[in-house]
Amino acid sequence: MKNNISIRTILFSAVSITLLHSCSNLKLKTEGRISKGIFPEGKKGPSTNFTGNAFNTGLIEPDSIYNTLVGNVYFEPGARSNWHLHPGGQILIILDGKGYHQIKDQPKQKLKKGDVVKCPPNVLHWHGASPDVGMQQMYIVPNTGKGIVDWKQAVTDEEYTGL
């Protein structure tokens, strides 16, 4: 009987250690990834406007009272928008992850959770995730009576990496 208790104790300890080790490995494997947040994933953005996988969820459609468009975009690692401009401007609020924003002919700006970016009206820019970590952003497009977005060419790999 004593041997059975010892064997059970040893087996229980071995299984417990294995489970703890597996759980700690799982945590390490998911580190650096971000959640897709409180909003639904949304629709995949078209390859004509995005490089990589970006998912958009509209939250507020403009109307005659609120002349503003609000939505959420989740960029998978390495995903980015094309160059584009907004006739009425745009505000980005970074909800999670890491990424970049760049105005044409200006240095690329690093983005992280909590950053807020104002994109002036009619200014060519792009934004997207870092190569290794995705990014979730809320976008606000005010003054939609002036237009919403004017898509341009894709951001090249050289522009994205800064090489």
Image (tube, helix red, strand yellow):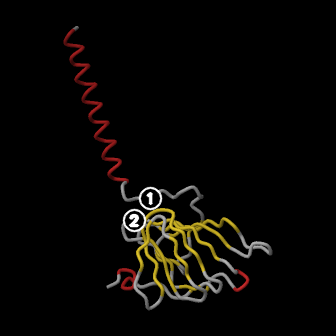
Q: Which circle marks residue 115 in the picture?
A: none
Q: Quick one: 114 or 70, which is closer to the camera?
A: 114
The answer to which quarter of the image holds residue 33 is bottom left
**Extreme residue toward the bottom, this view:** 105
Residue 13 position, x and y percent, is 25, 27
Q: Amino acid at mark 2?
A: Val
Is residue 52 shown left or right of residue 58? left
Q: Residues within 10 Å of mark 1 (few under 14, many from 20)?
A: some
Is tag 1's residue or tag 2's residue first in the polypeptide sequence?
1
Q: In the structure shown, which secondary structural element does the residue marked by tag 2 occupy?
A: loop
Q: Residues within 10 Å of mark 2 (few under 14, many from 20)?
A: some
Q: In the structure shown, which secondary structural element does the residue marked by tag 1 occupy?
A: loop
The answer to which quarter of the image holds residue 98 is bottom left
Q: Amino acid at mark 1?
A: Ile
**Dot 1 and dot 2 residues touching (CB under 8 Å):** yes
Give the residue number, with chain letter if any, for mark 2.
133
- Residue at image coords 59%, 58%: 39
The quadrant of the rendering that contains the N terminus is top left
Q: Which circle marks residue 34 in the picture?
A: 1
Real-space CA distance between mark 1 and mark 2, rounded to the nearest whole angstrom: 7 Å
Q: Where is 123 relative to 37, above or below?
A: below
The answer to which quarter of the image holds residue 31 is bottom left
- Residue at image coords 26%, 34%: 17
- The mark total stands at 2
